[in-house]
Amino acid sequence: MSEPATDRPKVVPGEMSVQAASKSYGAVAFRKEVVRECSFTVERAKLTVMVGPSGCGKSTLIRLLAGFEAPTTGGILLDGAPVDGPSRDRLVLFQETALFPWMTTWDNILYGPRARGELTREALEFAEFLLAKVGLRDFRDKYPGQLSGGMQRRAELARAMINNPKVMILDEPFRGLDAMTKELMWEYYAGLYEENRRTNFFVTTDIDEAVFLADRILVMSNIPTQVRAVIEVDLPRPRRLSDMVESDRANDIKKQALSILHAEAMRSFSRGSKAAADFVDAYLKRSGG
Amino acid sequence: MTGGLGKILASRSFWLGAASIAVFLLLWEIGSRSKQWMAPEFFAPFKQLLVAMGFKKDYLPWIGAVPAPSAVLKSWIAVLGQQGYWQSWYMSLFRVASGFFAAMLIGIPFGLLLAVNRVAQGIGFPVFEVLRPIPPLAWVPASIIFWPTQESAIIFITFLGAFYTIVINVLGGARSIDVRYFQAAQSMGASRWDIFRRIILPGTLPSIVVGSAVGMGITWEVVVAAEMISGGGSQAAGSGGGLGFFIWNSYVGGSYEQIVVGMISIGIAGFVSSELLRWGGRFVTPWLKVR
């Protein structure tokens, strides 16, 4: 952690903007709109956290940002240029580990440079640096199956960072870790972010996680997904868990986010029953005619 | 090596296995020496139960006709010195190896092609699926007609035994690779070729190993039957041969001990080839054994 990051390839953070993006699935008759006219910005060199109830379409938004899928309408831009297809500029850390099980930690980290034919001396040195940075030097020749959950997440962070993405997208990356490991990963990840101020887009269902990590919190509505509120988190950095527990400000922000989420949950609850009624109506009409 | 052997000798499962085989041989010896229907006297209650359930004596196996293990062993030792016995081994091994490697050589690329290319799948898969339910042994007459030599016919049938299993496993294995691996690789700038070489190929490898192991088992079943049918039918000396023919020949010649010798030989051959394959499989998929 003490090594200077200055001799590393310079990180150029990007800024992403989602402009009135909508995404629907299914054939016309059974169309389900998951994202509706959603607009927000993932600000440059900031850690933006998106919270929302599970199943609210966050993962769909991630697929749009990463370029695995295109929005039905609307646009997604990175530094003003439209996103078309996956790219090393926007790397995703998936919910459960997506390390290649047949490669050692070292080969996993080097996957990107090797795939692009950029296996230079600098790349190898950078990989060495990252391996040490994520504390996996002793696990260099181990397979992902031999690593603990927390180690796998760290190896994956290294595998992403070696590509110097303009934006890092993290889809509930610490889900499934035990509480202790999870909190350690929060501090660890916050430290990484504070060091190089990459643009990070982090998705979670965990409010504590959101408040601890975020510069900005986007609170999402239920399906179809829209941004319900944006909360600026002005807590000082570097952040430590011990400080956060005692911070009144952190608790205020948490309460604020929770009340919005609660209102959203209540609303979707009532709307849910109406949607069900509409569906039954439409179905009766169709079968009658 | 000695450490490994010591470990095996110290393990509980080894002695349980040895005891199980010993008990099996003992019962077999007793049953065989009794020269009776079904089983010796101490199985009488069981026998009466079966008779009471409506089984007639005629439906029960003539255990007494089975040669005893001691007799089989004697016959085996005698046969060990004969060139014909080893020739049978060689013939069967050669056919299994040829058919099996041909199945791997053609089946693995074919399965991968079906998995990665929609057009190839659209063209290839229907024909494959129509031919697949035909048991390899149903091909025996046709392949004797179509192939120039009997040898090539037997190898072809052996090939069929492993081919379908290998293709199905490769196809299923390649299809079940987690989509996130592809997405991750794509995001990091991997080309299609790189994804094929470093994601699809290693991701399919465990299924290739499984498919090959299953295919190897089928190969032995098929080769023995094919040898009995085609080799056993032809009287020409030299042609045919193989362990399947060895059994058939022993049957025709009335040497019942030799039938059992042939059966056990096939058991050993199948076991050894499966073990070799499993060993090779562990070697090419080192990440699977580490957990």
Image (spheres, rainbow, N blue to C red):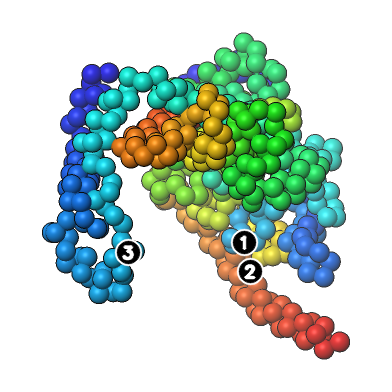
Q: Which residue is mark 2?
A: A264
Of the residues shown, which amino acid type is indicated by label 3? Asp
Give the image location of residue A237, x and y in percent. 53, 38
- Indicate which label's residue lies in the foreground, 1 or 2: 1
- Given residues B13 and A193, the one toward you in this image is B13
Give the image location of residue B157, x and y in percent. 61, 37
Q: Residue at x 59, y 65 (%)?
A: A261
A73 relative to B216, above or below: below
- Given residues A17 and A155, the one toward you in this image is A155
A142 sits left or right of A224 in the view: left
A38 relative to A275, above or below: above
Q: CA distance from mark 1 to mark 2?
A: 13 Å
Q: Chain of mark 3?
A: B
Give the image location of residue B154, x and y in percent. 59, 33
Q: Residue at x 65, y 12 (%)?
A: A120
Splitting the image into 4 quarters, where does residue A161 fall?
Answer: top right
Q: Which residue is mark 3?
A: B58
Indicate the secondary structure of the residue bearing disc 1. loop
Circle on res. B207: none
- Given residues A53 and B86, the one toward you in this image is B86
Q: Residue at x 31, y 37 (%)?
A: B257
- Indicate which label's residue lies in the foreground, 3 or 1: 3
Splitting the image into 4 quarters, where does residue A89 fall?
Answer: top right
- Which mark sits nearer the N-terminus, 1 or 2? 1
Q: Which residue is mark 1?
A: A55
B93 sits left or right of A117 in the view: left
Indicate the secondary structure of the residue bearing disc 3. helix
Q: Chain of mark 2?
A: A
Splitting the image into 4 quarters, where does residue B113 fall?
Answer: top right
Q: Are marks 3 and 2 in contact (CB under 8 Å)?
A: no
